[in-house]
Every structure is written in structure tokens, then in C-alpha cells.
Image (cartoon, rainbow, N blue to C red):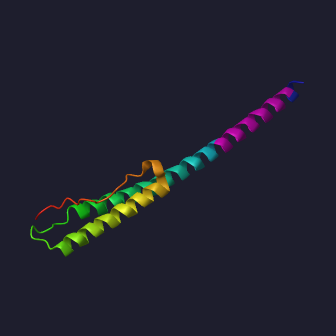
Amino acid sequence: MALVVSVTTLSWAWFSAARNEHKSSQSTEAADREKARLAVIRSHLQSFYIEGGSLMDKPVPPNASPELIAQYTAEAETWATKANTWIGTELGKGLQLGLSIAQPILRGS
């Protein structure tokens, strides 16, 4: 009788350990997938940040022609639309920033 109880106990312990290992492997896989997903998001957001910063730091001469200002404005609008669309698509509409460059702030050099 003691042998039957021992075998049953060992069987249960093995089953329990296997179940826990399976759960933890799924949990680890899910955590790894989430980390990878967040790394991609971080990378995209960082590239938008860098690109936006370079647009802001672009020197505009004080006597810039209307064509040059229109070109800079178009570049900024393209960036804002691209960033806003990506954020809405990948992170959800609630996180969209409503980016727009209606009145560009130009820095003189």
C-alpha cells in the first residue's frame, strides 16, 4: 500500500512539475514576444523622434524664400502625417497625437 501511495505521489509531483514547466515556458515565450514587440515600437518611435528633431534643427535663413519655407513645411507635414499614421495604426487611435504643422516655427540661423 505504501508503494502505491508513493508512486501516486511521485506521479502527481511529476505531473505538477511538468504542468508548471509548461506554464512557465508559455509565460516566457509570451514575455519574449512582448519584449520583441516593444523593442520594435521603441525603435520606430525613436526614429520618428530623431527625424523630427533633425527637421526642427534645420537652419532656415532669415531671408528664406517662400519656396524654401514651403519645402520645409511640406517636409514637416510629411513627417507628422507619417508619424501620426503609424502611431494610430500600431498603437491605437487613442494615442494619436494629431500632429500637424499648420504654422511652422522656423529658427533663424
Q: Is residue 12 above or below residue 62?
A: above
Residue that protrudes farthest toward the right in the picture? 1
Instruction: Classify residue 4 as left or right of residue 95.
Output: right
Name the foreground residue: 103 vs 4: 103
Instruction: Classify residue 2 as left or right of residue 14.
Output: right
Residue that protrudes farthest toward the top in the picture? 2
Residue 57, x across and y down, in percent: 20, 62
Residue 56, x across and y down, in percent: 22, 61
- Quarter of the figure with residue 74: bottom left
Instruction: Indicate whether residue 20 is drawn in magenta.
Output: yes
Q: Quadrant of the C terminus?
A: bottom left
Residue 105, x across and y down, in percent: 20, 59
Q: Is residue 16 above or below residue 68?
A: above
Instruction: Classify residue 85 as left or right of residue 56.
Output: right
Instruction: Indicate whether residue 22 is drawn in magenta.
Output: yes
Name the foreground residue: 100 vs 39: 100
Q: Quadrant of the N terminus?
A: top right
- Quarter of the figure with residue 53: bottom left
Tally the marks: 0
Instruction: Classify residue 74 as left or right of residue 16.
Output: left
Name the foreground residue: 8 vs 25: 25
- Quarter of the figure with residue 99: bottom left
Q: Please report the bounds of the magenta region as a residue range.
A: 5-23
Q: Which residue shows up at 16% across the image and 66% down it?
A: 59
Q: Which residue shows up at 9% across the image and 67% down it?
A: 62
Residue 92, x across and y down, in percent: 49, 51
Q: Is residue 97 above or below residue 72?
A: above
Q: Which residue shows up at 11% across the image and 63% down it?
A: 108
Main SS class of the magenta portion in the image: helix
